[in-house]
Amino acid sequence: MKTQTQTRAQAQAQAQNRHRPFVFINMAMSADGKVSTVRREQLRISGVDDFERVDSLRAGCDAIMVGVGTVLADNPSLTVKSEDRREERRKEGKSENPIRVIVDSRARTPIDAEVLNKGAGMRIIAVSERAVVEDVARLGDKAEVMVCGREEVDLRELLYLLWLRGVNRLMVEGGGTLNWSLISHGLVDEIYIYVGNVIIGGEGAPTPVGGQGFIRNEELVKLELISADKMGEGVLLKWRVES
């Protein structure tokens, strides 16, 4: 029987053979499957143990990716919070924070966003050819701008460019739109979801995956359960995306 470590190593090798990083999505949701309120206000769903887990995941990655919607709604810094983990990265010859990647087709990221101003490390903003030249130039003072795709960011091309930069392990902390785009294009290897002990409700409240959704049963993306572990008053689910 294959161990979890062996299987994960094989999955990462397979991602490399496809000329892209190993991609995993990490999220927290309520017991009823919501990630925020109908007003899209960020809520505390998980506890200290999960915050530490997420910080450890960030420290172990080459890059972290979010969509511009997450930047506008939550204004995250996406930095490694633990000084010990930052120091460990420095000892390994890495920047104290992974590369932070923003998928922003129209170059709408605010120039004063935390992700562009807090913490050391490279930032990359991926835009499409439809982005306004002046906005691209403005963001170019804060980050490297990559043009990928005509109408919207071509995620497959972006992942390939990141892979060429040496990004082998990519963590996605985006919202439902980015998650849908990656999953529907077959670009995700694993999904980690912390399910908290709260009910948020609301027909229009965001869920972990948005987008247009699949219609037919044969289109559905199937998952293989890696583990289900109690953490605090919630549960951490880890899934492998089946090819």
Image: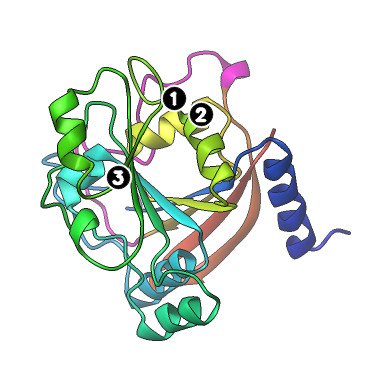
Q: Is there CB contact under 8 Å for labels 3 and 2?
A: no
Q: Secondary structure at mark 2?
A: helix
Q: Residues within 10 Å of mark 2 (few under 14, many from 20)?
A: some
Say whether residue 27 is visible: yes
Residue beneath label 1, please? Answer: 154
**Magenta-tinted stretch:** 196-219
User: Image check: 171 left or right of 1?
Assistant: left
The answer for how far apart the CA atoms under marks 1 and 3 are is 27 Å
Marks 1 & 3, CB-CB < 8 Å contact: no
Instruction: Report the front residue among 211 and 207.
Output: 211
**Residue occupying the far bottom of the picture:** 84
Q: Position of residue 169 (x, y in %)?
A: 56, 54
Image: 169 above or below 118: above
Residue positioned 51% across, 51% down in the render: 170
Q: Mark 3: which amino acid?
A: Lys
Question: Label 3 belongs to which residue?
Answer: 34
Secondary element at tag 3: loop
The quarter holding residue 207 reads top left
User: Which secondary structure type mostly characterizes the magenta part of the structure?
Assistant: loop
**Residue placed under numbered mark 2 in the picture:** 157
Q: Amino acid at mark 1?
A: Asp
Q: Is residue 29 left or right of residue 191?
A: left
Label 3: how many residues lie within 10 Å, few (<14), some (14-19) or many (20+)? many
Residue type at numbered disc 2: Glu
